[in-house]
Amino acid sequence: MTRLAFFVSGTGGNALNLLKACREGRVPAEPVLAIASSPKAAGLGRLQAEGLEGRVVERKAFESDGAFSEACYAACDAAGVDLICLAGWLKKLSIPPRWEGRILNIHPSLLPRFGGPGMYGMHVHRAVVAAGEQESGATVHLVDEVYDHGRILAQARVPVLPGDTPEALQARVYAAEMDLYPRALADFLKGR
Ligand code: GRF
């Protein structure tokens, strides 16, 4: 069975949702590790409370993205992790060849639109509303060296409704993510 790690910087909502999907047999993988980029990431305690081993790896403890990334991968190697799911992870990772194609991310827009540096969280939804888009959504993709750029695995679309605030749009996209990420991960594992 594929051994999973979740990388979180925030609430851990997506990671908890994936954990549940694995434990209910909807995703054929075994979560074994959670890595948080800050001890303040609420997701870490929530995942540990579910019995997952948790580690904090802080960017500021390292001099480069590469050294930081290797510390994260070392924790993964020690736990026998095969696949990493970024779930609200906000730090830049370097992707060495051995991890290419083994790191997934979820982004709250229809990539390639509204992605890239600075496009995270509410910034994305503000930009979508300001652009007068009629549609938004979420994307699950493989992670490469360029922000929000790797191969797209699956997308979910939601309407942008007249009068939508960024907050209202975020809630609609987030609800779609809860269905999308487990489904995309299960399909990815099936195709591996
Ligand atoms: C999600 O909107 C996800 O698309 C993005 O960050 C948010 C994570 O939220 N990458 P949570 O920490 O899972 O609640």
Image (spheres, rainbow, N blue to C red):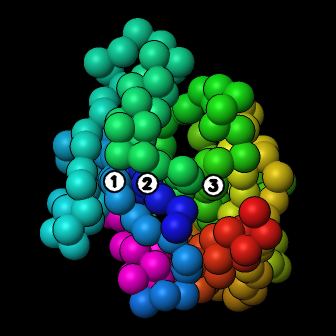
Residue neighbourhood size for the residue with mark 1, other residues' Cα within 10 Å, grouped as few (<14), some (14–19), many (≥20):
many
Residue neighbourhood size for the residue with mark 3, other residues' Cα within 10 Å, grouped as few (<14), some (14–19), many (≥20):
many
Per the rendered image, the range of residues in magenta is 10-23
Q: Check contact, mark 2 vs mark 1: CB within 8 A.
A: yes
Extreme residue in the top direction: 63
Q: Secondary structure at mark 1?
A: strand
Front position in the image: 169 or 180: 180
Where residue 71 appears, as percent x and y from the top left, is 39, 26
State whether residue 143 appears in this view: yes
Q: Secondary structure at mark 3?
A: strand
Where residue 72 appears, as percent x and y from the top left, is 41, 33
Give the image quarter of residue 92: top right
Q: Say which amino acid is labelled 2.
A: Ala
Q: Which residue is mark 2?
A: 5
Q: Say which amino acid is labelled 3.
A: Leu
Image vertical order of residue 186 relative to residue 95, above or below: below
Dot 2 or dot 1, earlier in sequence: 2
Front position in the image: 136 or 151: 151
State whether residue 123 appears in this view: no
Classified by dominant secondary structure, the portion drawn in magenta counts as helix
- Inter-mark Cα distance, 1 to 3: 14 Å
Extreme residue in the front direction: 1
Where residue 101 appears, as percent x and y from the top left, is 72, 46
Q: Secondary structure at mark 2?
A: strand
Q: Which residue is mark 1?
A: 34
Front position in the image: 78 or 49: 78
Mark 3: C-beta under 8 Å from nearest atom of ligand 1: no
Mark 2: C-beta under 8 Å from nearest atom of ligand 1: no
Q: Which residue is mark 3?
A: 104
Q: Say which amino acid is labelled 1.
A: Ala
Total numbered badges shown on the rendered structure: 3
Image vertical order of residue 76 relative to residue 182, above or below: above
